[in-house]
Amino acid sequence: MQKDKGFRRRVITLITVVLITAAVVAVYLAYGVHSRSNLPLIVPSNADWFYHFQSRSVDEAARKSADSRPLYYDSFYYTLLKLPVLHNVKDAGQPGIYLMTDVVLFADKKGWYAALTVTSDEKLNAFCRDNVPSDLIEKPVEKPEFTYVKSKTRNLYFAYKHKACVFYVPADTASDVAAAEAALNAVFTQKDSSIYNIQALQNIYDKECQVVYWGGNMGHGVQLSGEMTQFHFSDSVRNQKPISPLYLFSKAGISYNEADIDRILNKNNQIKSREYLNQTFRAMYYFLKPFVQ
């Protein structure tokens, strides 16, 4: 009888441990999939414009069915692989970077920046050292706040630290290494003055938008979970005349004639989620051009 009680006690203990472990794993997975990205923290508050493309959430929307998959989806992924440091990537997880989780793009007076999420500094260090052709980048340079490599073929820098990596193209083509280091140092150290601290921008994020744009003290977010795209504008935009859903794309240099507008927007000035994604992937190519040309 005593043995039987001991056995039951061990079984109950084991079941409890399993349930607790399952609960912890469930919370971890839920946090990892649905938590808000910290990547915008690297964007300074004085950025001219800021664009956050939450690729994993967009990917879920894009893959609902083969018929609804946007035409430009694959081209976006392959555009990322044209970045010098990612030239030799055969597996998306190989360099220690999330290629399709979050992409943050922004610009200031110093230049243009593209940021991705890092999964492992050690893995990324090894990748830059061993897998990138030596004719493409210089050897990694370690600084107190970040590590960076410079492209040998053009005025482009790649820096990383902890959970973020940044591609940087100086606005001044004559910019030297010291100026680039100063610009990157500002990105990696000035989190207290991040654009993410702007309350109006946080309000947009609270709407669980997959795409967020901010520029000129105004912004909007986009939800793509339904058939029709839902826009959430900051107060400064809502108080002005109505904004076309094609506003962001025109900022990326994409032009539309009347026939395009009639085809893309319905009579209520709305756009389907699939068509919005299609135009978004076109816009991403334009935003990424400074880094892949």
Image (spheres, rainbow, N blue to C red):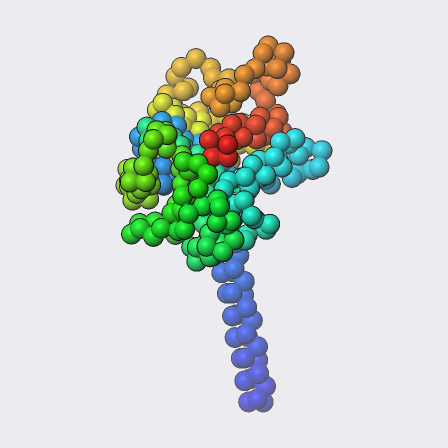
Q: Nearer the viewer, residue 14 or 260?
A: 260
Residue found at x 38% / y 47%: 148
Residue found at x 63% / y 37%: 74
Q: Position of residue 52 (x, y in %)?
A: 46, 35
Q: Position of residue 243 (x, y in %)?
A: 47, 17
Q: Is residue 26 above or below residue 225?
A: below
Q: Quadrant of residue 216?
A: top left
Q: Is residue 81 above or below residue 277?
A: below
Q: Position of residue 139 (x, y in %)?
A: 41, 51
Residue 183 can be seen, yes or no: no
Q: Quadrant of the N terminus?
A: bottom right
Q: Nearer the viewer, residue 262 or 30?
A: 262
Q: Nearer the viewer, residue 198 or 87?
A: 87
Query: What is the count of numbered marks?
Result: 0
Relative to 99, 220 lies left or right:
left
Residue 277 can be seen, yes or no: yes
Residue found at x 52% / y 75%: 13
Residue found at x 42% / y 38%: 156
Query: Residue placed farthest to the right in the image?
Result: 67
Query: Residue placed farthest to the top in the image?
Result: 258
Q: Position of residue 116 (x, y in %)?
A: 46, 43
